[in-house]
Structure formats: C-alpha cells, structure tokens
Amino acid sequence: MMRKIFITFIVLFLFSFVHAQKFSGTIVDKNGDPIVLANIVELTKDSLFIIGTTTNTDGLFTIDKGKDASILRISSIGYTNLFLPISSKQGDEDFGKVVMDYSDTMLSEVLIKASRPLFKQKGSSIYTQVKGTVLSKLNTMDDLLPQLPGAIKGLSGGIEIFGKGSPIIYINKRPMRLDSELERLVPSDIKDIELITSPGPEYNASGRAVIKITTINKNEGFSFLSKTNLKQSDYMSGGQNVILGYQFQKLSVAGNLGYKYNHGRLSQPASTELPIGNKLHRYDKGQWGETRTPAYNYQLSVDYDINDKNSVGLSFDGTQNTNKECRKGTLDYLVNNIPTNSAIIDNHYKNKVNYQHINTFYDGTFGRVNTTLNADYVHNENDYTQNTIENHPKLPSINTYSIGNGKQDMLAMKLEWKLSISPQTYMVWGAEIGYTNSNGYLSISSANKVNSDYKTQENKYAAFVELTKSIKDLTLSGGLRYEDYTYRYDNMIVDNTLHKHYKHLFPSFRASFDNGSWNHTLVFSSQINRPTFRQMSNASYYGNEYMYQQGNPRLAPSKLYSMQYYAAYKFIKFSVEYTHRKDYIALNFYNNGKDNIVVSTYKNFPTMQNINAYVNLQKKWGIWSPSLSLGISQPFFKCDYRGEEKKHNKASAYMVFNQFFQLPHNYMLSSYVYYNTGGNQGAVRLTPFHSIDFGLQKSFLSNKLVISLNAKDVFHGMKFKETELLDAFYFTQTEDYHLWNYSLNITYRINSKKTKYRGKSALDSDIKRL
C-alpha cells in the first residue's frame, strides 16, 4: 500500500508542472555553491518596487512576472548587488545560473542596527544567519551552537537538540567526523547554520537532527589561524590548534595540527536494590576520581577544481588520545538491611584510541544533473587496561586485572544525483554501500567466567529518492529510502554464531507554505537507529566483585516514525512533534535469580513515544540582542517493575535565555541561562538541573585578534540525580562531571577564510556509532 501511495505521488508531481509567465534562475557564488535566501526583487525602469521573493536552499528562485517589470535586482549579505535587464517579450524567462561576486564592504554595522531576525524558518529547516550579525563576533563554537533554537546542553555538557539528542553535524556539506573539526572553526568564518530536525531520505540520520554549517567562501592566498584555550575547573586544562591553508586558482590545500589536554574530576555515588527470593540485596557505592586525556589531532586535505563544473579532492585525518582515569570508592553490601560486606576500591583505567580516516570525493555537473561521489575508509583501534584493588576490613584483598583490544575497519561509498527538472521542481536520488568488520577481546582475572572474544561483520545497501516541487507559495516533497542490512556475530569462546538480516522501507513527506510573513510546514519521516558498537559488544567490564557492565549482541535496530509541524511568524518560531520508537534501545539490569551478581546491559523495549513542543522568540533592541526558548517533552513509556506494569510518563520542560550586549570599543558581554525540570527519559527519572554562563570578549587589530573570558555553569547546577525502576531493580545515582569552568580563549587569524574541503563522508552514521 505504501509503495502505491508513493508511486502515485511521484506521478502526480511529474504531471503537475505549471506553465505560468514567470522569471526563474539559480543564484550561486564563484565556487558554484548556492546562495540561500538571496533577495530577488522586480523593479520598474524608475526603480519602483513591484514584487519580491528569496532563493531556496539550492539557490533556486521563481517569481511571477509583474506588469511594467524592467529590472531584476539580486542582493545578499556579503555579495555585490546585481541588476539584470528584463526583456519585454512574452513568456517565461530563465536567467540560468547567476554568479554573484563577494563584496569587500562589511555590512555588519548596518545589520547590527537593523531588526532583522537571526533565525528564519524555511520549510522544515531553521536558518541561523551568522555572517554580519552579532553571532559572528563570538569567539568559539561552544558559544555559538547553544544559540540555535531548540539547542540545549546535554548530560555530558555537549550540544543536543531538544527531543533528538546529539545532532549529526555537516561542515560545508561534509559530515563532521571528529569534535576537533568543530573546534577548529571560528564563528566569524561562518556564513549560516541550517538546523533540520526532520531529515529527509538522503540523510542516514538515525532519528537525530542535522546541523549544516556553511563557511564563508575563500579568496586566493595563504591563511593562518591559531586558537589557544586555557580552562580552569578543579584542574587546569588547555589546548592549541594551528591551521595553515593555501588557495591558488583551482587548487586548495589545508593542514591542521592540534593538541588538547583535559584534566577533569567526577563524582558518581550510586545505590542498587535487588530482591532475590525473600532477601533484599543492596549495593551502596561511593565513587569519585579524576581523568586525564591528552589528545592529538591532525588533518591534510587537497581540493582541486578541474573546471567550473567538476572538482575532486582527498582528505586524510586522525586523532590519538589516551584516557586515564583514577577512581576511588567504597562499597557496602547489605542483605535485608544488615551489613554483610564492605570494601575500599581503587580503580585505574587506561584506554588508548587511534583513529584514522581517508575520504575522497568527486563533484560534477552535466547539464541539469549534479553528481556527487564519496568514498571512505576508517580504521579505529583501542587498547584497554584496568586494575581494580578491593580492600576488605577482615578478608583478603581482591586484585582484578583486565586487558582488552577492539578494532573496527569500515568501508563505504555514496553516490548521489540531483536533477533540476524545472526551476520549480527537482529530484534527488542515490545509493549507498557499506562494510564494517569489528573484532575484540577482553580478558578479566575474575572468579566469574566473563572473558570475551568476538568478531562481527555488517553489510549495508541503501537507495533513496526524493522529489520536490514548488507551486507558488506551496512546496511539496516526497521521498523513500530502502535499506538492506545484514549482521553476523561470532563468539570465538563458545563457538556461537548469530545472523540477522533486515530489509526496510522508510517513506517521508513534507508540505510547506511560505508567503513571506507566515511559514507552515508539516513533515512525516521514518528512520532507523542502529545500536553502537559498544552496545553490541559482548565484552564485560569489571566494576566490583558484584557488578559488571556488558553489551548485547542480540540488540535489534530501533525504528522511528515522527510527525512534526512547524510555524513561524516574524520573530516567533513554534514546533510540535510526535515520535514513535519501535524496539527502543535502553539500559537494563540483569540477574539470573540465583546469585547476587548484577549485570548492567542493553535491551530492546517494545515502544517509546514522545510529544515534544517548543517556541522561540528572538528580537533586537539597540545594543541588546535577547533570545528566549521554551520547550516541553511528554514521554509515554512503560515496563515491568517487580511484577507490575510501571509507567514512566513524567514530562520535562526547559528554558533557555540568551542575551548579548554590544558595547563600545569592540567589547561584547553575553549570558546564557538554562533550566531543565528533569522528568523521565525512558525508565530514568531526573531531578531539575541548570546552568548559568557568562562571557566577556574584546577584539583587536581589525578583528584579527579576539580574546574572551568565559564562565560556564558558575553555580555548579549541572548535576544529574537519577532514579530508575526497572525489572526487579531499584537504582539511584548522582552523576557529577564537574562541568563548571572558567576559560581564556585567544584566537589570531590572518585571512583565515581561505580553504575548504567539499567531500562528504559516506560513513557519517557508522563513525558516530564508534
């Protein structure tokens, strides 16, 4: 039935072209990249305004031919205005591909005085204008990304999109693979940011949002960028990145070398209760410690334009880091509230990771068809050691030693075509193939036989198509994604093999109405979320003599279906979404009912549902630029707890209030206030948490040098107290990663808007699973 509906939809689209008297064309920059939201205005010969419109995400525009139209004016921030003559002949007129030159005049001061919103709703995307606005004056991406409507701080301190979790980030159309790629950017080099909360079939988004960052186009010559960061929390941390680039005519070369040292502290007291027969077992664990992680990252990329319609490139990047943790703690074991055993625990962890990635791409245009090919290879390896010493008051101490190794090799290729059928209609289709080989072992000198040795193989084949048509103020899109996925798991210890084969169709649909003042968009999407490699590993990690952590090779992928409505009017944005997850993946506890061992693992639950809604308001008054976001999430989730059905439907709400004050002499003051009421995330229930940040910065030497002072989570409110009632277990824990810090950031750049690499990783979703 779904296939018939989709085929009917495609046929209707192909036969519904409207041949009215119109102007059309595609607005691009000198590199051939589309210019989004360029202003298209018809004027009379006396320069009187007749009618106007803007370009879409592909730089396309269509506008009705007005009476007495004589001049077509094209303008966009950072580009020189174009004036094209309009012929007097009857019929449609296609201006083809119109190239705009970059403007040498900075418009930031004009924009600062204007009241144009920073955010614009376009279909199911929210565009954030960075260039020429107050956001371009921020010093780091950590300051910029939380400004996006719907963005919040996650439990680990990173950026998340409300109701979607951590987003997939694209930089100049290429999926970001490492956090260091984002750290190398500075807001002044960014043109705009597109946030897509309901990605189409061309994105293997796995239920997450997509952030697309477009940098300012580059001129010829050398570029140099140096970023220095010093951060004081419980301990001192810091980092340094140096980027060199060279662009000459058709050749662009860029190299980066970075170093970062994180020295942090954590506290994780927890308690677990488990009834076995007529006895109640309780495990009270205190845990605190510190982490040290030195990390090196590097990148070298070459990008060459064969001609104005064809380009190729090659990129090599990687990172090496060694995470060392020293955790100390206590364990009190009680049976029916009677102390039975206790221990003082000393844990030392070391995990060394070596990640390497190669990407090559081709991008070409033949007639009305654009072709993009990306091929990727990734090698990831980690070596793990752990030494746990448990000292008991009256019993001999227990010394447990763990050693392990894990490797992943991934190959992938993605081929995508885009056909402009007419100025109002285009089609995108393509195919993906991927292969992953993973193996690992973990040996533990424990009385329990929990050693592991395994191999896994994954093969993925996918095809997708999406058709988009505009009819005046209405834009319709329909798409379909097909995936064929096979998985094989081999347990090398007990000679056990597991095979899985999945075939899925994922339809999507989008309808958007935009008349310039109002925007209404309705989106239906379906996606798949595969478990991470850690979740599917059978490796068991030692906690103490009673507790282990391990993965679950039998996990099935989770399927997501969502319906989302957007509305926007001037400076107000609103969204409401319903999401249904089938085979929802979440943390679970396991006990065989015979001994007193507790194993934390992962499990597929039948369903998980959410209704999310948020509203954003952004306005500017003089030197003050405030933005307010309010959101609420209502979950619907249930599971068994000690023989009864338990509902976990506690709603959570959040508030984010950002504001900037642009002061004389190139000073800028900013603040960020985030409050979350807690609520349920699956079976986990959180108490309220909050963060309040402040920033002060000043630029020197015509903005070449920027120095900022920042204070994050100044009142230490990012502590996460959680309770979980699941199966037979009652679990409570407080996670405090000491996210508060004070930092000094120094950025110096010379012509840093230079080089860019235009390849797209075909392994974006699998890399995230690492």
Image (cartoon, rainbow, N blue to C red):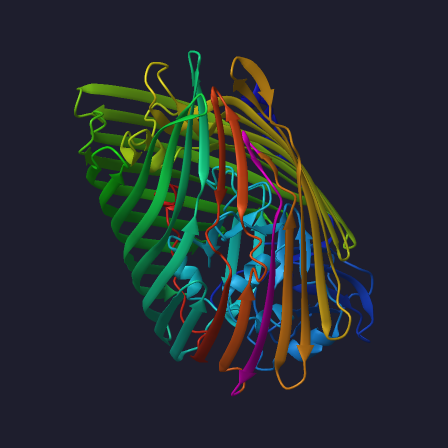
536 relative to 410, above or below = above
In this figure, what is the number of numbered marks? 0
Please state if 701 lies on the left or on the right of 240 as rendered: right
Quarter-of-image position of residue 387:
top left
Q: The N terminus lies in which quarter of the figure?
A: top right
Q: Compare residues 626 and 764 and report the one nearer the observer.
A: 626
- Residue appearing at x 75%, y 67% in the figure: 620
Q: Return the x and y of residue 518 as percentages of the image width and height.
A: 78, 50
Q: Return the x and y of residue 500 as percentages of the image width and height.
A: 33, 21
Which residues make up the magenta segment? 681-701
9 relative to 253, above or below = above
Task: Identify the residue at the far front of this view.
Answer: 394
Please state if 422 lies on the left or on the right of 553 as rendered: right
50 relative to 394, above or below = below
Q: The C terminus lies in which quarter of the figure?
A: top left
Can the viewer see residue 732? yes
Q: Return the x and y of residue 219 as percentages of the image width and height.
A: 45, 76
Q: Main secondary structure of the magenta part?
A: strand
The reply to whether the magenta stretch includes residue 664 is: no
Q: Compare residues 529 and 326 and report the one nearer the observer.
A: 326
Q: Return the x and y of residue 166 as percentages of the image width and height.
A: 50, 46
Q: Compare residues 568 and 401 and report the one nearer the observer.
A: 401
Can the viewer see residue 556? no
Please state if 262 lies on the left or on the right of 56 as rendered: left
- Residue appearing at x 31%, y 37% in the figure: 343
Q: Compare residues 31 and 733 and report the one nearer the observer.
A: 733
The reply to whether the magenta stretch includes residue 691 is: yes
Quarter-of-image position of residue 685:
top right
465 relative to 738, above or below = above
